Image (tube, rainbow, N blue to C red):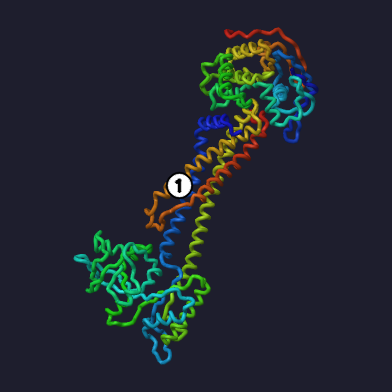
Amino acid sequence: MFHKDSWQEIFETINNNKLRTFLSGFTVALGIFIFVILFGFGNGLKNSFQEFFMDDATNIFRLFPGTTSKPYKGFKSGRLIEFDNNDIAEIKRNFPTQLLYITPRITRNYVVKYIKKSNNYGLRAVAPSHQFAEKTILMKGRFINHQDVKNKTKYAVIGRLVEKDLFEGDDALGKYINIGNRSFKVIGVFQDDGGDNEERYIYTPYTTNQLIEKNNDKVGEITLAFKPEIGFEGAMQFEEELMVFLKKRHHISTADENAIFIRNVADDLNQNQQFGSLLQMVVSFVGLGTLIAGIIGISNIMVFVVKERTKEIGVRKAIGATPRAVIFMILQESIFITTAAGYIGLFGGILLLKSIGTSLEDYFIKNPYIDMSTAIFATLILIIFGAIAGYVPARRAARIKPIEALNDK
Amino acid sequence: MIEIKNLHKSYKIGSNSLHVLKGINFNVAEGELVAIMGSSGSGKSTLLNIIGMLDIADEGTYTLDGVEIKDLDETKAAKYRNKFLGFIFQSFNLINYKTALENVALPLFYQKIPRKIREEKAIQYLKKVAIADWANHLPSELSGGQKQRVAIARALAAEPKVLLADEPTGALDSVTSCEVMQLIQEINDEGKTILVVTHETDIANMCKRIVFLKDGLIIEDRCVEQVRAKADVS
């Protein structure tokens, strides 16, 4: 039946019934187009969402010191808690099975100068493993290493935008910048997926900062990573043990909620992933709705098309068309139109998604996309349902006695 | 060519049954030109539809060219129609989005004849009905008489044994009617068996034999002196 001749017959029919062809083709193309766009936007939302929440490593605890809210062992409440080098050493010593790495993070603000340019930047005094916790990507040079920490060197690793602002396109590597009136050598430039703000930081060895600040041993916040193999449950238990351990060290009541804070990224991650899958569900639901609307549309048009052609079918049968030939004619035509229109809609939608890129980032839609298999699957679904929707009335039309079809006005 | 014995047909209208054909016995030999006459409701169109396998009889036998027509499913009926019969309708029933040529070629398409041969044959039959100049026009661009000529060419294209014409001149003025009848006579002269359903006496008189139907029975069946249709009759 899929003979060259029957194709010619189909093309003649299509060519001579442009409105009908346009209507059914347009429905399918629009259905697929909207499906692709909506699905793509959903994925774009997910992209933005991931960027907000997932730029850091996910096996991370952040420890923040606070102020005691309860008197304990002779200490009054309202005592300021501070972490120091010994805390880090003791955590390392006591939790070797769970701990992957640990780093202090002292955050300061400095005016930073290079020749005549100057600006205010955040400075983070850290240990080498901070690079993994923050997923800092080195563009050139290197990050702080253990030697720098040991020797308390005045080395700085600057963000991409710091280099851009201060050096205006020149290479910063090996140059000396002035941080709070002290000269630091730039040993690396980094970028970060966390966005522009993350790329306006400067990293220095934490020991250097301690030396500058009257050779103290305070470390600000502590960031640590657990071994991924302990799993989510293990991480939650580690968090509890860590809290007990630190409260004991700093003489804090176990009931005190304000003295030490632990932010568990694993816990956040769990919530984020739940939100992510909710988003995915919404996107899938919207996509399904669009597809169903498309299927209903194409079904209506097929019923209309067959109704419109009842008389023609009667004539064809009177001059020798078998029911099979009639059904094949209608199906072949409808499948051809839905396939062609489906691909037009598909590529139109993909093209539009591609052209959007990052231009809708303000609306939290970044790099919308649809994976090819989903898009083609949706198109196939529409083609198949279009064929089924055409088959039912076509079969009925093919069964009508030609005389009834001919009397149909 | 056609043998019909004791043919019955009734239609169900709601709970009532309308007995349209009440035992028709009727034979047609090859090369005849038969008019079937009767007032409306006499069953003449029903008889033609059964002969044309567009409809199925309730009772009786029907033999066409030595083949007994029975147990017809749609596929079989379509094949017989395509092989044995050509139809000419009152309302022409051309496919309106196809040109005259494509309409004439359509029965050959269902005989799976290659496109080139189809078109050659279609042209040949359009020439025969003297309308080849209009081959690439759509039915909407043709007059009633021209449309009926195209329909006759289409009926002839499949080279059927019998031509069935249901009120072929019903939608035409008298001059055009004469032209169409002249064409039908010419085709008959070449030996084709033709059945014409009509209620007009002058059309019936242009045939060679007239069968009168009344209330589902044949009340008269006689041969007549054929009146030749003349195109310039005014």
Quadrant showing the N terminus of chain A: top right
Res. A73 image quadrant: bottom left
Asked whether residue A314 is in view, the answer is yes
Tell which residue pokes out farthest to the front in this image. Answer: A147
Q: Nearer the viewer, residue A60 or B157?
A: A60
Query: Compared with residue B32, is residue A146 higher up or lower down, i.e. above or below?
Result: below
Q: Percent x, y for residue A295?
A: 56, 45
Q: Residue at x 33, y 77 (%)?
A: A150
Quadrant showing the C terminus of chain A: top right
Tell which residue pokes out farthest to the left in this image. Answer: A116
Q: Chain of mark 1?
A: A
Res. A54 image quadrant: bottom left
Q: Is residue A296 left or right of residue A68?
A: right
Q: Is residue B180 left or right of residue B214?
A: left
Dot 1 lies on which element?
A: helix
Q: Residue at x 63, y 11 (%)?
A: B186
Asked whether residue A409 is in view, the answer is no
Q: Nearer the viewer, residue A401 or A159?
A: A159
Q: Percent x, y for residue A103?
A: 38, 75
Q: Percent x, y for residue A398?
A: 65, 34
* Neighbourhood count class around disc 1 (C-alpha, 10 Å): few under 14, some 14–19, many 20 upward: many
Q: Percent x, y for residue B164?
A: 67, 20
Disc 1 marks which amino acid? Answer: Gly
Query: Compared with residue A371, is residue A84 higher up or lower down, i.e. above or below?
Result: below
Q: How many marks?
A: 1
Query: Compared with residue A209, is residue B39 higher up or lower down, i.e. above or below?
Result: above
Q: Is residue B127 left or right of residue A349?
A: right
Q: Nearer the viewer, residue A345 or A221?
A: A221
- Mark 1, residue position: A349
Q: Nearer the viewer, residue A372 or A40?
A: A372
